[in-house]
Image (cartoon, coloured by chain):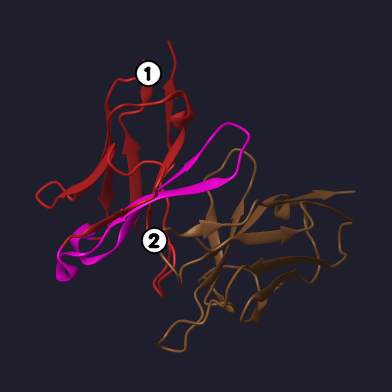
Chain colours: A red, B brown
Amino acid sequence: EVQLVESGGGLVQPGGSLRLSCAASGLTLSDHYMEWVRQSPGKGLEWVGLIRKKADRDTTEYAASVKGRFTISRDDSKNSFYLQMNSLKIEDTAVYYCARDLSGGLKNYWGQGTLVTVSS
Amino acid sequence: DVVMTQSPLSLPVTLGQPASISCRSSQSLVYSNGKTYLNWFQQRPGQSPRRLIYQVSNREYGVPDRFSGSGSGTDFTLEISRVEAEDVGVYYCMQGTHWPPRTFGQGTKLEIK
C-alpha cells in the first residue's frame, strides 16, 4: 500500500524558514513526478511546484508566488522529498500536501497534509 | 496562465438525484500529443483531496461508476448519476496541459438538500 506522510509544519514568523518533508512507502519517489499543493484556510487548492523523476533529470518547476523563495528537492536514500520554504510571508499560511503526479495516468496519491502558520 | 472557471460554486442536491459541475478553461487543453489533461478532484470535509477522473473521462481505480467525466477543448463536465451522502464535499477541476503552473478551478461545494 502506498503512503505519503508529510511532516515539518508549524508556526514560523514572517521572514522565517521551514522545511517540509514527504516520506513515501510503497513507491519509489525517484520514479515519479512529485508535487506540492497548498490550501489556505477556507480556500481552494493552489499548486506550489514539483520535482520531475530521475529519468527527467530531477528538474523542478514552481508557481510564480513561491519562485525564488521555495525549493523542492529529493533524497533517494530516504525515499523522501522536501519543500524548503524561505522568506515566508503571512499569505503562505496553509495546509501543504504532497502528491504523486497530479495529472498522469498512474494512480494519484496524496499525503494527509501539514499545517504551516506564518504569524508574528 | 490557464484560468479554470467552475460553475456552480454551490450545488445543493437531493439524495439519489443527479448532479453536474461545469469547468471551463481559458484555452484549449488539448496537448500536442492529442491528449487532454483535465482532472477532477474531490475533497471531503476534513480530508485530503483525491483524484476522481483523469484525462477528461478516465476514472481512478476504486471510484464509483456513478462519477463520470466528459468534455473537450475548453468545456468539461463532472456528473454524478445519483448523489449519495458520502459525495458531500468540494470538487475541483485542474488542468495539466499548459504548465507550469498547474491550475485549479475555484471549487464547487456539493451539499445535500
Q: Tag 1, which chain?
A: A
Residue extending farthest to the bottom is B34
Q: Tag 2, which chain?
A: B
> Which residue is identified by label 1?
A14
Q: Is residue B16 left or right of residue B95?
A: right
Q: Is residue A90 left or right of residue B27?
A: left
Q: Is residue A29 left or right of residue B28?
A: left
| Residue B68 seen in this snapshot | no
Above-or-below relation of A102 to A76: below
Numbered circle sitting on residue B100: 2
Name the quarter where the N terminus of chain A is drawn: bottom left
Q: Residues within 10 Å of mark 2 (few under 14, many from 20)?
A: some
Name the quarter where the C terminus of chain A is drawn: top left
- Residue A42 falls inside the magenta stretch: yes
Span highlighted in magenta in the image: A28-57
Instruction: Identify the amino acid type marked 2.
Output: Pro
Which residue is located at x 42 percent, y 68 percent?
A107
- Residue A84 falls inside the magenta stretch: no
Above-or-below relation of B102 to A63: below
